[in-house]
Amino acid sequence: QKEVEQNSGPLSVPEGAIASLNCTYSDRGSQSFFWYRQYSGKSPELIMSIYSNGDKEDGRFTAQLNKASQYVSLLIRDSQPSDSATYLCAVTGGGSYIPTFGRGTSLIVHP
Amino acid sequence: DGGITQSPKYLFRKEGQNVTLSCEQNLNHDAMYWYRQDPGQGLRLIYYSQIVNDFQKGDIAEGYSVSREKKESFPLTVTSAQKNPTAFYLCASRPDGGGNQPQHFGDGTRLSIL
């Protein structure tokens, strides 16, 4: 059974700081990694995909993948109160193409 | 605009009643999924379909049923056998079931017991 682990939080950061969200996964064969943002009462929204080791940047978001250590992280630079949400990590591959989701990390950005 | 449409947004179920949640997509995606989300529980897979006329049970299929008669439609029925149906139900799709593309989600249906 594949497992995807996230710290449930809440992670509280001041406005303008860097928020760092982490995700570890159990299946070494995993190939695709996704970060979703979910506002309270809303559905998940894809914000980043990453498939190879290293960093991938998109605006204020950077995803970092380290397959040897089996973790993927999401950095949010210049955090804004509007970034306050739950961030879900999802992983696919390794013999199953059904995505496995972590339980999410709650992020609070305070002014 | 292409997307995934779930309806209704809110649904109430009476004791002993079956209810059906609608999910329609116009993205031409082969694979569709149903998830249930409870507070603090993350997303749990109910059923998925990788192609028309075929579907598979997920982790919590008991008390639910689905059909996939058309590529664009994947309705979920919550039967009276599901004793604790109150949850947020999310439908998702992606281009194909065997690839590495991300899922995209509809806006969800919130189901409550009357």
Image (spheres, coloured by chain):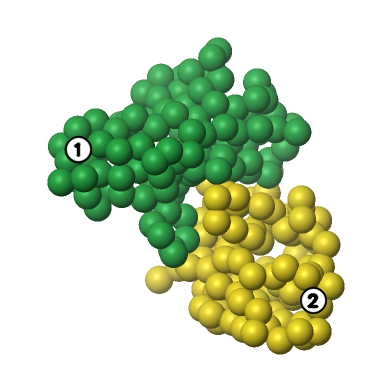
Chain colours: A green, B yellow
In the picture of the structure, the residue carrying the numbered disc 2 is B79
**Rendering coords of residue B31 (x, y %):** 66, 56
Q: What residue appears at the point 59 percent right and 82 percent down from the top-left corner?
A: B11
In this rendering, would B105 be left or right of B29?
left
Q: Is residue B25 above or below residue A102?
A: below
In this rendering, would A77 be left or right of A1?
left
Q: Is residue B89 above or below residue A37?
A: below
Q: What residue appears at the point 68 percent right and 49 percent down from the top-left corner?
A: B97
Q: Which mark is residue A65?
A: none
Chain letter of disc 2?
B
In the picture of the structure, the residue carrying the numbered disc 1 is A14
Q: Is residue A21 visible?
A: yes
Q: Is residue B38 above or below residue A70?
A: below
Q: What residue appears at the point 53 percent right and 46 percent down from the top-left corner?
A: B102
Residue type at mark 2? Thr
Residue type at mark 1? Pro
Q: What residue appears at the point 24 percent right and 52 percent down from the top-left corner?
A: A82
Q: Say which of marks 1 and 2 sits in front.
A: 1
